[in-house]
Every structure is written in structure tokens, then in C-alpha cells.
Image (tube, rainbow, N blue to C red):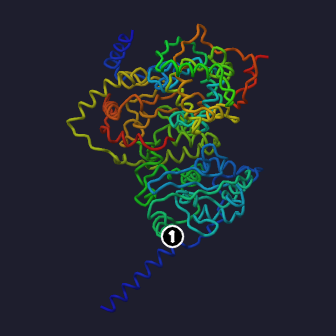
Amino acid sequence: MLRKSRLLTLFWVLVMGPAAALAAEDSMAQRMLACAACHGAEGRATGDGFYPRIAGKPAGYLYHQLLNFREGRRLNAQMTYLLERQGDAYLREMAEYFAGLSLPYPPPRPPQAEPARLQRGLQLVRQGDAARGIPACNDCHGEKMTGVLPDIPGLLGLPYDYLVAQFGAWRQGTRRGTAPDCMAAIAAKLNPEDIDAAAAWLAAQPMPADPHPAPGLPRPLPVSCGSVSATGVTR
Amino acid sequence: MKRLLIVLSLLGVLTTGTVFWLGLRGDPGDTTVASPLRAPAGVSPAERGRYLVQVGDCMACHTRQGGADYAGGRVIPTPFGDFYSPNLTPDPETGLGGWSADDFWKAMHEGRSRDGSLLYPAFPYTNYTKLTRDDSDAMFAYLQTLPAVKEARREHDLKFPYNYRFLLVGWRALFFRPGVYQADSSQDAAWNRGAYLVQGLGHCSACHEARNALGAVQSRDNPAGGLVLNWYAPALAAPAEAGVQDWPKQDIVRLLRDGIAPGASTLGPMAEVVYESLQHASAEDLDAMATYLKALEPTQPPPARGAVQVPAHAVEDMAKRGAAIYTEHCASCHGDAGEGALPAAPALRGNRAVIMASAVNPIRVVLFGGYAPGTAGNPRPFGMPPFGSTLSNQQVADVLTYTRSAWGNQARPVSAAEVARNRQGPLW
């Protein structure tokens, strides 16, 4: 098919002189092709481990990240440059476009860590550390950790490098959310061994059969988060 | 001998005196000239000023990312060092709180601060000196209505010897003559209005004209565009660059207002100008700017600056490798023959943004991609992907060398060294 269309183009060039511009699809998919360069085709991530998957993440979460990049709360020169001169409505549309993509997840890479580290990671993720004021990941990110609509992202299906880099960014202030910035507060209480263990365990988990974000949380959030609207809690 | 010495020292004193007189003289300016913008009746000065401040895009420099509007603090990197913009809000300690309309006029018209110190021309008073007193007063009136924000001025971080402010005396003697815009009676009102906007309030030449080694825009007829904020601002009068002499006027208006027009779009700092400023300009002002730009005397294509020689024997291999890269990464949107696919991907064949002598913008677009500004007239722009993490400097040079020489394009090759140089610096 492709070959045929190229031959056809060649025909037009040779016979009709310089080709007229082709018509492109007037769609969101076409508009968002620029994102694929780093985030993979349709935002499904690539194998390089740094750029996160964006397909299927909750729309509210994606929208807040786009705003954070645009307004410099989250520092990434490339992202800020791409978003700097776009209005709220278009950013919202981008977020909803990627949130609406339901694509299969590749299996996780085999665990890179020894069992003791993974065990420690599991404990932090499931139970937190009450003595140090660290809530369990599950408490906010959902029982299955696939995120909660509309604002809380899932923690599975993300590479170890990306997860670790985010904690570094919260600790250094290069990733900030709307105040109160709950994740920055939690990241400040974690030590490098905690972060390594939790990220290693999370990155090794397969996606559950239903990878979609949960519709709501059974309990109110244990911490206050400026970027989470009240609708995240099931009433 | 003695007589010669006397003559020489007299000449020296005279020259020094002239320089000091030219650089330091005060100029009250002709305050009777009425603005060619013709303020609509019934609009208060502050309201009028809000519009002028927006069309002048004061925000671009005087607001830092995440900072309060007009509170300054934005870094403006230049070859002379980093300038930090001052606070324009009416805070008495750190802003314009204690200023009068006369002080503001002195800054805009004469390039001098309230205390008389000389201002660096990073603040484009060489353009603003053309503004009329009523427009300056209106802008000041608006700025005084802003919420006062305490944001201390950050000192400029300039290289030696530019950090010595008194040297501006010499610079001003050479390059600055204060003077309010004088209407050209041989032209109509729209042209004069456009000239006032382009030369004065819009300060287009601050970016679109090359600066000499001392940072001065060289002359009114300067044929070259300027390298500003790591982008190349193409020459406005050169049909090979940004000249619009043969464009329909409505297309010029679309480019200025919407950020895209048939065969052209804005990226980088110009996208910011469109997004923050020009999309809000009135229909009359956009029409006037288009009238003026369309009437510019066409100039020759400017020479290539910053080109790194590529040995002739290497060019063929580069283009051959570039063709393969083009097929893999570019052809699906831009077409096998660079014909483009509208509305998503512009044609590359015959596209002057691709083939102009300066390769800075094509390099930056391949490395960093970009979206045209999301304006009311084009709220959902298409985007170019960034290839900076996919392609090496050599690969970017190869694909650009191919693109600039294929399908009838005839532009010089691009070297990997030139690509490397443009990977650095902040993004805008």
C-alpha cells in the first residue's frame, strides 16, 4: 500500500510536474505525533526507560502535568518549550486524547533487585511506614495501583529509571505540583534505599487483567494534595 | 612641534567633548506629536496603555516564568552577558512606585533611568524613542494600575568591559539619536501607523536586524536578520527570508495574528510574540503593520553567518545518508518529494524557512520540534516532533543537507559542528 502510494507520488512528480501538497489527517492523532518522538507511538513509551508511557493515564493527572510543565513547576526544557504557547483548552484536549487510548502493556522486565530489596519495596508500597509518616502507595494510587480517576496516576507499567528520577526531582524541587505538594512531602521523608526498593518492586509488577484506573477511592486521601480534586473519593 | 601638540590636544578635547555631549545630552523630545495609532474616543489612558503595553509585548522580557506579571526577573542572554529585566509594577522599593510620567518618558525617549543613569540598549529605547508622549503616558498610567509586587531587581551579569555602564556614553554617541516618530507625508495614514508600530512600539528591529560587535542595530537598511535567543530572526525586507512584499495582505495579517499563514508559521521567540502580543492587536493595527511590511524596499538575501565549511567531497555522501534518514523519519508527513501534507506538515521544497542562508532555525526545529502558537485563529496547532534524542549531530547535518539540496532546493550544506553549536542554550 505504502509502496503503491509512493509510486503514485513519483508518477505525479514525473508526469504532472512538482507534486501538490498531500492532504493530512485533521485529527488529534496527527496533532500529537510530536509526542511520539519521546513517549513512543501513541504514547505507549519506548524501551529506553526514561520517558514515561502516557497512554491510558487519568486525564486529570495528565492535564495537571501539562500545566505544571507549561508554568515551570515541573522542569523539563523540552516539554516546556513544546507547551509554552498553548491554551488550557488545548492542553485539556491533549490530556483526554492520551487518557482515552487503551493499549496493551508489555510484560515488565524481570526484577533487577535481590529478594530482600524487593521485600522491602513491597512493604513500603503496601503498608508505608507509619512511624516515619509515610503512607502506603495503595492508599492513594488505588488497590491495584493502576491509578484513580480523574487525577491520580497509576504506578505500574513504568520503568525503574523513570520512577527513581521522579523522586529525585521531587526532592530537588524540579518537579512540583499545585500546593500542597503531597508527593514532594512524601519524597522528602524517603531515603535513597526506600526509593530504590519501592521503584524496583513497582517496576517488576505485571499489569492486572484490567489496567484501567479505578473509578474512586474507598477512603479519603491520607494526605492533602493540591492536584487532586475531591471527586477522586468515592462517596 | 609645540603648535602641533596644541592642535592635537584641542582636537582631542573637542572629540571627547562631542562624544560626551552626544552621549549625555538631554532631549525633552517633541511632546506635541499625536500618536499615529489614534486612540479611540472614550478610552481612558490606563485602558489605552494596557493595549499599548500588550502590543509592545513588554511582558516578554518583564515577566519571568512563574513570576508575577511585569515584575521582571527574566534573564535575557546576550553575547555581552545576561541581562535581568527590572520590575515594572508600582512597588515603591523595587518597582516603578516612586516614578512619575516624566521619569517614564525619560526612560522610553532618552534611555535614562530616573536617577539619570544610562540604560543598556537591551531595553530597546532605540525603538521606543519613536513613541509619542501621549502613548508613553498611557503606558505608564496602565503600569501604575498593576498590583504592586515586591521583586528586587537582579543585577545584570555582564562580561568585562560591558559591565562598566559609563561606557554607554560612547555607545550612545555612536548609535543613539532620540526622536519621536515623524510621519512621512508622502505615505498614507495606514503606512505611517504601521511604521510607528514596526519601528517603534513593536520594536521588531530589536530581533530582526543584525547587531554589530557593539550590539547596535547597524542601520535602517541593514539587510541581515538577527541572531537572538538562539534563533535566527529573518530579515524583514529580504524576500528570500521574511520579506512579504509579494504576499496578499490578509496572509501577512494571518501570520502576525494567528501564527500561521499559507507557506509560513511562527516558532521560537516569534511564536511567543504572536501568542502574548500580536494576536491581541486590533484589526487596524494588524492591517497597518501588513501595509508597512509589504511596502518595504526588497533587499538582497543576507550572507550566511556562522556557516562551518563542509568539504565538497563530503557533501555527496552526506546527502545520500540524509536521503535515507529523510525516508525513515520525515517522508511520512512531509512527503517523498518534500511537498508537505496540509494542514499538518508544511512543504519543505521551496520553503524559505528551510533554505535560507542561516541554518539555525532548521537545525533547532529538527532538534527540538515545536508547535505554532495556539491562538484564537489556530487554537489546535499541529506539531513537529523533536529529533534531538533520536538523531546524532551528524545525522541532523545529513538530513538537512539533503533537504536543503533536494527537489530543486539549493541551499548550502549544514555541518555537524553547526548542529552541535545549536544543541546548546535555552529553549524559547
Residue B298, given in percent of the width and then of the height, sits at 42, 47
Nearest to the observer: residue B354 or residue A189: A189
From the image, which quarter does the N terminus of chain B lie in? bottom left
On the question of residue A42 being in view, the answer is no
Nearest to the observer: residue A182 or residue B210: A182
Chain letter behind tag 1: B
Instruction: Name the residue rendered at 43%, 52% in the picture.
Output: B210
Instruction: Name the residue rendered at 57%, 28% in the picture.
Output: A194
- Horizontally, residue A215 falls left or right of residue A66, namely right
Q: Is residue A190 above or below residue A234?
A: below
Q: Is residue A211 above or below residue B162?
A: above
On the question of residue B74 being in view, the answer is yes
Quarter-wise, where is residue B341 in the image?
A: top left
Instruction: Name the residue rendered at 47%, 76% in the picture.
Output: B18
Determine which residue is flagged by label 1.
B166
Nearest to the observer: residue B184 or residue B85: B85
Residue A181, given in percent of the width and then of the height, sits at 67, 34
Number of callouts = 1
User: Which residue occupies the extreme right position in the image?
Assistant: A235
Residue B87, given in percent of the width and then of the height, sits at 64, 55
User: Which residue occupies the extreme left position in the image?
Assistant: B313
User: Which residue occupies the extreme top position in the image?
Assistant: A209
Q: Neighbour class for label 1 at 10 Å: few (<14), some, many (≥20)? A: few
Residue B418, given in percent of the width and then of the height, sits at 34, 42
Q: Is residue A7 above or below residue B147?
A: above
Looking at the rendered structure, the secondary structure element under dot 1 is helix
Quarter-wise, where is residue A137 in the image?
A: top right
- Horizontally, residue B157 falls left or right of residue B143, namely left
Q: Is residue B22 above or below residue B245?
A: below
- Horizontally, residue B116 falls left or right of residue B315, namely right
- Residue type at mark 1: give it: Phe
